[in-house]
Amino acid sequence: MALIRKNQANLTAAERSSFVNAVLALKASGRYDPFVRLHIDRGNGDSDFSTRIGHRSPSFLPWHRKYLIEFETALQSVDPSVTLPYWDWTTAGSTSSLWANDFMGPNGTSTTNWRVNVGPFAFSTGNWTLTVRSDSANFLRRNIGAGGLRLPTAAEVTSVLGLTTYDTSPWNSTSTNSFRNYLEGFRGPNLHNRVHNWINGTMAGFGSPNDPVFWLHHCNVDRLWSQWQARNPGGTYVPAAGTVDVVDIDEAMNPWPTTPRDMLNHSSVYTYQ
């Protein structure tokens, strides 16, 4: 039976607690940090003009879909009742219950280099030291809305969902009229990337999975891809074959043998609420 991924705003108190506890258990067991290392290594290896797999490329969406499934599987090995929730950032901003002290925790504090000082993922708890990271801070940092940045709006999301072409040559961050690139956030209204930068701090670098809100953010990105797929059943993944440095539909996405085609239909694994 397929799992159901819920909007984080609709989780019960028990579901929120179970999710947090499963994440903390993975961290305590040493099984969380390899996910961070994988994302850092993949991000550092992706370039507009050479190999690109997890970012700046058509496989951004299927790579992260596989990544989410692997993480969700790890969570369920701790607690089979847990599934990944998604964060709809068009309706839940800085005052959302997402940032409650018993869930993701609040914004950081300016006087402590934007360290998150409260909540289950605060450094002071002793449960959330960043040992695999992309900056010098060994604690979770957030500087929400830095520089006056705002979250994407529903209208901006609708405009991106209205694009009918999955991706376009040259298959990188310069691609225009590309659903993938506009959702990833290098063109158009800058969706995915803008959310990372809006949270700022730990989320602004490739070590962003060190902030557990990463998983809720990317779950929403995956949900939007799922919606686009339903609207465009004939607009499958491209490129099909013959490219260099980009993953074609039937090529494996490092580090897995999984191909983009394997990730096109998630309905047997999970659905969205």
Image (cartoon, grey):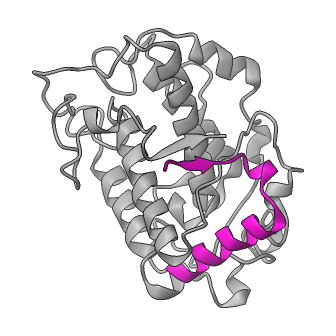
Which residue is rendered at x = 44% and y = 69% of the image? Answer: 74
Whether residue 104 appears in this view of the structure is no
Which residue is rendered at x = 43% and y = 74% of the image? Answer: 33
Whether residue 86 appears in this view of the structure is yes
- Res. 197 image quadrant: top right
Position of 18 relative to 175 (above/below): below
Residue 108 among those drawn in magenta: no
Which residue is rendered at x = 15% and y = 36% of the image? Answer: 251
Residue 60, horizontal then vertical, whole percent: 38, 37
Residue 5 among those drawn in magenta: yes
Residue farthest to the left, as pictured: 242
Side of 4 where 186 appears, left or right: left
Side of 168 where 6 appears, left or right: right
Residue 248, horizontal then vertical, whole percent: 19, 29
Side of 191 where 150 appears, left or right: right
Residue 249, horizontal then vertical, whole percent: 22, 28
Residue farthest to the bottom, as pictured: 126
**Viewport quadrant of the C terminus:** top right
- Res. 166 image quadrant: top left
Which residue is rendered at x = 62% and y = 52% of the image? Answer: 216
Q: From which residue to which does the magenta span run?
A: 1-26
Query: Which secondary structure dominates the residues rendered in magenta?
Result: helix
Residue farthest to the right, as pictured: 95
Position of 165 relative to 5 (above/below): above
Side of 22 where 255 appears, left or right: left
Position of 79 relative to 194 (above/below): below
Count of numbered tags: 0
**Front one among 80 and 201:** 80
